[in-house]
Amino acid sequence: MFTTYSEALDWIHARLRLGIKPGLSRMEWMMEKLGHPELKMKTVHIGGTNGKGSTVTFLRNILEAAGYSVGTFTSPFIEQFNERISINGKPISDEEILELTNIIAPLADELEETELGGPTEFEVITAMSFYYFANVNQVDIVLYEVGLGGRFDSTNIIQPIASIITNIGLDHTNILGHSYEEIAFEKAGIIKEGIPIFTAVKNTNALKVIEEQAEKKHAPLYSLNQDFSITAHSPQVRGEVFTLKSDNQILKQLEISMIGQHQTENASLAVMAAQSINQHEEFKISEQAIRTGLKTAYWPGRFEILSNNPLVIIDGAHNDEGISALVHELSNRYSNNTIHIVFAALKDKKLDQMIAQLDQVADEISFVSFEFPRAAEATDLFSLSHSETKSIGENWDSHLVKCIQNSQPDSVLIVTGSLYFISEAKPFLCEFLKNNKISL
């Protein structure tokens, strides 16, 4: 028995030593022991390479605006561990984490003695969420974000009322495959028999795989630019405005507060899923709820402006597709500014392509490392850059302070890379900006 939140968290994090173990057998074993809580709730499943967290947030806010209680399971966390299991955007309490750990830990110990082996950190947290939403704090609906891939992801034992695949990119290729088709096949593993699937996948080969899997499962498929489309897109200072057209409706002048053209795609997926959910008799979601939900949705660490003077932006662009979206926004919005990028990443990413893109848009680029088992060394990142103004920050925190202190009126500081880095850098930056009376 754990007696403190700290003890519980240490036990959970210690399971990182088991790494990533794709497969559903351990989850199925634990669910059997718990009486199958995963089948006692209404869920929506959200997979894809980028945009999962933002799409979850858009859909959560729409459902909240319609008056429903909404559970979410997301990863990784940005500001605190507990946010991975939340209700209406509020992370569960330390006491609840402790309670859940004391329920799951004995099962993990028992499972360890079987031929299946012990559950990973992610499997433990997923099991905790199932038990929580089914038995501790029941809600109207739970939005489950896929952790990795889809077909063998720990979350893929739910029976959702709708599924979403945001996009497909060449990420986690050592596990999911080295082609768009292979990765799409893994992502498409969340498609369930007869359950509607919504996607913003653009790669032709990847989309073909999803179409084939949807047809096999007799799942109605709705694709961006085929069954629904975005028009009249207009970037705003703090967000985007766009029109969403589908076969049966046109929603004009939808407003979102998240920045980036890609966020209009995530928002459109959320709207389409909400309209599908609306067909279930337990739900009633108005157009006003959709508009309110989109406008109020906020997801930390996604092209988030932390201060205006100096201009400091933090963005969890952690793979090639994320970097492309970031570079696109920087080129469109800040072409007249001096751009300084601070970058940290995990060593198992396609770093050469990511850094090459950043080199093109950065007037100055610096590389840092951070405390994490898979973090890349700053010197290795530095060696991949061809920028003539590249540098290394020995300590990421003191380096960020130095960058802010040296900012000029026309400069913009972009802190980007791994979400694990962003989860450390954001609270540090917010505290520093607050203490120095630098704010929005």
Image (cartoon, grey):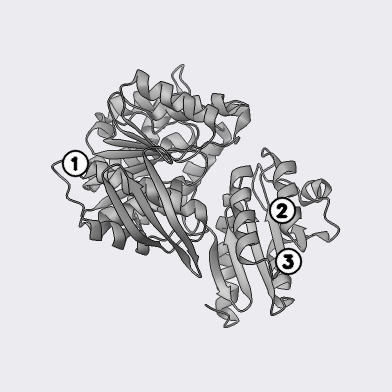
| Distance CA(mark 2)–CA(mark 1) | 44 Å
Is there a contact, CB below 8 Å, between mark 3 and mark 1?
no
Mark 3 residue crowding within 10 angstroms, few (<14) / some (14–19) / many (20+): some
Q: Disc 1 marks which residue?
A: 279
Number of dots carrying numbers: 3
Q: Disc 3 marks which residue?
A: 399
Tell me the kind of residue under disc 1.
Gln
**Residue at the limit of the structure toward the right, as seen here:** 388
| Distance CA(mark 3)–CA(mark 2) | 19 Å
Residue at x 58% of width, y 35% of height: 17
Q: Is residue 102 among what the camera can see? A: no
In the picture shown, does residue 356 fall above or below 153?
below
Of 285 and 157, nearer the camera is 285
Residue at x 50% of width, y 51% of height: 262
Dot 2 or dot 1: first in sequence order is 1
Task: From the top left corner, tell me how far across and down residue 51 is, in percent.
Answer: 48, 47
Judge left or right: residue 335 versus residue 203: right
Judge left or right: residue 86 versus residue 289: right
Mark 2 residue crowding within 10 angstroms, few (<14) / some (14–19) / many (20+): many
Dot 3 or dot 1: first in sequence order is 1
Q: Disc 2 marks which residue?
A: 358
Tell me the kind of residue under disc 2.
Leu
Q: Is residue 289 among what the camera can see? A: yes
Of 88 and 136, nearer the camera is 88
| Rendered image quadrant of residue 315 | bottom right
